Image: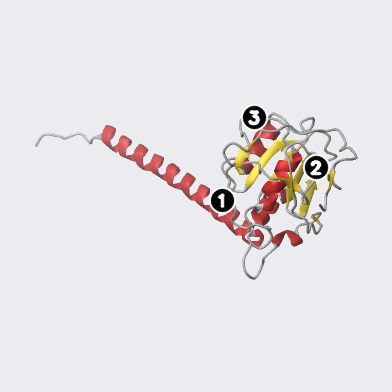
């Protein structure tokens, strides 16, 4: 009876395939677990009928009531009481806020209108946030509805987040409160004055590729009061 050698090559290949499958499966499980942990961690910051404004539980959030929602012309300024502004009179055209990342500072009066629609405006000091830090901040916004990101020269902190009537300033892009604030207020139908309003820029009113520029100079005596 002839001796038939064992197919060691085939066996080794099968073992290698099984090992690779185990690695891939393990990696997938780790990724799924991390995703589930993230979802669970953000659950407390997700608006609901029983938790309409989760931002009230975020340390450092400043709130202010802005009853006026008056519109101004593109040639006018508003004498905002805080910097960055997060409520009050604003331009009739809103800045696009569909996870939009602006590379240049944008006119405040247009940004405040976006907040009225339920957007979260993430502003950063370009002297403090750049390179990998800026990339990390972009990941929080890019493609996320009811959010926008823009540089804002002169910020006292590295990052400042604005929603209508709410603001949070933090010292670095790794602060967990950034994602909590966005989760709590981006598109929040309980806190936005105009919930569900579009974040797509109106054609002919706001140019996403060439937005109206931020004016760092103090508003003049003819500026419209923040409360109209």
Q: Where is residue 7, by image quadrant? A: top left
Which quadrant does the N terminus fall into? top left
Within 10 Å of disc 1 (Cα), the crowding (few <14, some 14-19, many 20+) is: few
The residue beneath circle 1 is 34
In this rendered view, identify the residue nearer to me: 106 or 181: 106
The residue beneath circle 3 is 210
SS label for mark 2: loop
Q: Nearer the viewer, mark 3 or mark 1?
A: 3
The residue beneath circle 2 is 171
In this rendered view, identify the residue nearer to me: 177 or 49: 49
In the rendered structure, which disc, 3 or 1, sits on the residue that comes first in sequence?
A: 1
Within 10 Å of disc 2 (Cα), the crowding (few <14, some 14-19, many 20+) is: few
Up-down: is 136 above or below 181? above
Number of numbered discs visible in the structure rendering? 3
Within 10 Å of disc 3 (Cα), the crowding (few <14, some 14-19, many 20+) is: few
Up-down: is 166 above or below 13? below
Q: Give the x, y percent position of residue 135.
A: 65, 34
SS label for mark 1: helix
Residues at marks 3 and 2, CA–CA distance in whole angstroms: 29 Å
Image-based side of 29 in relation to 157, left or right: left
SS label for mark 3: loop
In this rendered view, identify the residue nearer to me: 68 or 51: 68
Residues at marks 1 and 2, CA–CA distance in whole angstroms: 26 Å
> Residue drawn 67% across and 33% down?
211
Q: Give the x, y percent position of residue 114.
A: 67, 47
> Residue drawn 84% across and 34% down?
154
> Residue drawn 67% across and 57% down?
184
Question: Which residue of the protein is positioned furthest toward the right in this rendering?
Answer: 221
Q: Give the x, y percent position of residue 198.
A: 58, 50
In the rendered structure, which disc, 3 or 2, sits on the residue that comes first in sequence?
A: 2
In the rendered structure, which disc, 1 or 2, sits on the residue that comes first in sequence?
A: 1
């Amino acid at each position: 009876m002839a001796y038939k050698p064992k197919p060691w090559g085939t066996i080794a290949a099968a073992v290698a395939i099984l090992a690779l499958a185990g690695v891939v499966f393990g990696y997938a499980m780790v990724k799924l677990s991390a995703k589930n942990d993230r979802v669970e961690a953000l659950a407390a910051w997700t608006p609901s009928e029983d938790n309409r404004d989760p931002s009230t539980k975020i340390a450092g959030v400043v709130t202010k009531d802005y009853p006026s929602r008056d519109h101004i012309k593109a040639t006018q300024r508003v004498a905002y009481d805080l910097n960055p502004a997060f409520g009050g009179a604003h331009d009739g055209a809103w800045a696009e806020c569909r996870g939009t990342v602006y590379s240049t500072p944008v006119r405040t009066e247009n940004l405040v209108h976006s907040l009225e629609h339920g957007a979260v405006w993430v502003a950063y000091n370009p002297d403090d946030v750049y390179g990998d830090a800026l990339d990390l901040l972009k990941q929080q916004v890019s493609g996320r509805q009811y959010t926008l990101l823009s540089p804002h020269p002169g910020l006292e902190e590295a990052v400042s987040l604005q929603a209508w009537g709410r603001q949070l300033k933090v010292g670095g892009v790794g602060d967990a409160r950034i994602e909590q604030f966005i989760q709590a207020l981006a598109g929040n139908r309980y806190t936005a004055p105009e919930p569900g309003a579009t974040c797509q820029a109106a054609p002919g009113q706001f140019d996403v590729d060439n937005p109206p520029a931020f004016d760092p100079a103090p508003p003049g005596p003819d500026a419209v009061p923040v409360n109209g």
